[in-house]
Image (cartoon, grey):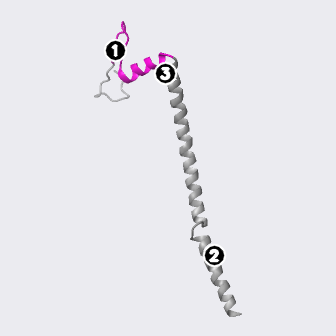
Amino acid sequence: MKWLIAILLCIFASLQYRLWVGEGSLAQIARLEADIAKQKLENEQLAERNRVLATEVAALKVGTDSIEERARVEMGMIRKGETFFMVVEDKDKPEGEKP
């Protein structure tokens, strides 16, 4: 009878080890759930970025307004007949001071 109790305790201890430390343990499950939540957040951010890019691509395909805007902002281009004015602020003056 003592041997049976000892064997049952060994089996119980090995099952407890697997539950708390081994593969498929509660700690591993919690870690995987945290990884899943992190990946879902990253996927949402990437989906939003893809949506913005798709909108931008559609705008570039449809009209010339978005192409013109990009040329003006990114390349500093101007149209014929327009006058370009560059306003340069004095770096010596503090920001809150009026001229």
Looking at the image, how many numbered discs can be counted on the residues?
A: 3
User: Is residue 72 shown above or below 1?
Assistant: above
- Mark 2 vs 3: CB contact within 8 A: no
Q: Residue 96 appears at what percent x and percent y?
A: 38, 28
Q: Residue 8 appears at what percent x and percent y?
A: 67, 84
Asked which quadrant contains residue 28, the reply is bottom right
Earlier in the chain: of badge 2 and badge 3, it is 2
Mark 1 sits on what residue? 85
SS type, badge 2: helix
| Mark 3 surroundings within 10 Å by alpha-carbon count, few (fewer than 14), some (14 through 19), many (20 or more) | some
Compute the Cα span from label 2 to label 3.
62 Å
Mark 3 sits on what residue? 60
Label disc, if present, on residue 98 of the rendered structure: none
Indicate whether residue 82 is drawn in magenta.
Answer: yes
User: Is residue 65 shown above or below 34?
Assistant: above
Residue drawn at x 54%, y 40% as measured from the top left: 45
Mark 2 sits on what residue? 15
Q: Residue 19 appears at what percent x and percent y?
A: 62, 71
Task: Select label 3 or label 1 by which is in front.
Answer: 3
Residue drawn at x 56%, y 60% as measured from the top left: 31
Give the left or right position of residue 3, taking residue 23 as reference.
Answer: right
Earlier in the chain: of badge 2 and badge 1, it is 2
Magenta residues (range): 63-86
Residue drawn at x 36%, y 8% as measured from the top left: 80
Q: Identify residue type, mark 3.
A: Leu
Task: Select label 2 or label 1 by which is in front.
Answer: 2
SS type, badge 1: loop
